Amino acid sequence: MSIELYDNQFKEGRKIVTVKDVEPEAFIKAFSQHLKRQGRFEIPKWADVVKTSKAKELPPNDPDWLYVRTASMVRKVYIRKGMGVGAFKKVYGSQQRRGTCTKHFSKSSGKIARYCLQQLEEMGLVEQNEEGGRVITKEGQRELDTVAVQAAAEAEEDDE
């Protein structure tokens, strides 16, 4: 209880201006809807049948899972510059169940991560870094920040 009061004291009068100020779930949901509405992100033919990892048995149930994954990836690139396909394979990996044997960590699909990053590059939100990985462009940062402000406004309306 006292932690909540402490947090609320610092939130008073604070204006949200960046992606880092918004809750991750709210931003990812808002940006995935933004990608879907915009229509610049192309969904490939294989999106409804592909597994996200060798550790998974079935493809995702959500028909908009690729928008959500892309929104999550662009947020991670915003927060931590220089993330590439290998880093995203590790981030989205999971435990592989092997029956009676012990579980082992398994990386996720590189094709999905590569495709999402290439689509974000075509849209002009990220670009390749000289040292490796991807970084956010100025236009991408501006677009992400505007979506973050909208997501924060929606979250405040839901709280009231």
Image (cartoon, rainbow, N blue to C red):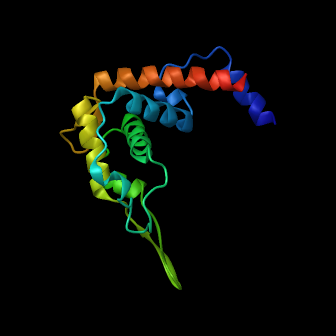
**Which residue occupies 42% across, 28% down?**
34
The quarter in which the N terminus is drawn is top right
Left or right of 81, for residue 159: right
Q: Is residue 131 above or below residue 155?
A: below
**Which residue occupies 41% across, 38% down?**
71
Q: Is residue 103 above or below residue 36?
A: below
**Residue 54 location, x and y as percent?**
37, 68
Q: Is residue 46 above or below residue 154?
A: below
The quarter in which the C terminus is drawn is top right
Examine the image and state in which quarter residue 23 appears: top right
**Residue 41 location, x and y as percent?**
31, 35
**Residue 74 location, x and y as percent?**
37, 37
Examine the image and state in which quarter residue 75 appears: top left
**Residue 89 location, x and y as percent?**
35, 56
Q: Is residue 8 above or below residue 103?
A: above
Looking at this view, is 4 or 112 the one in front?
112
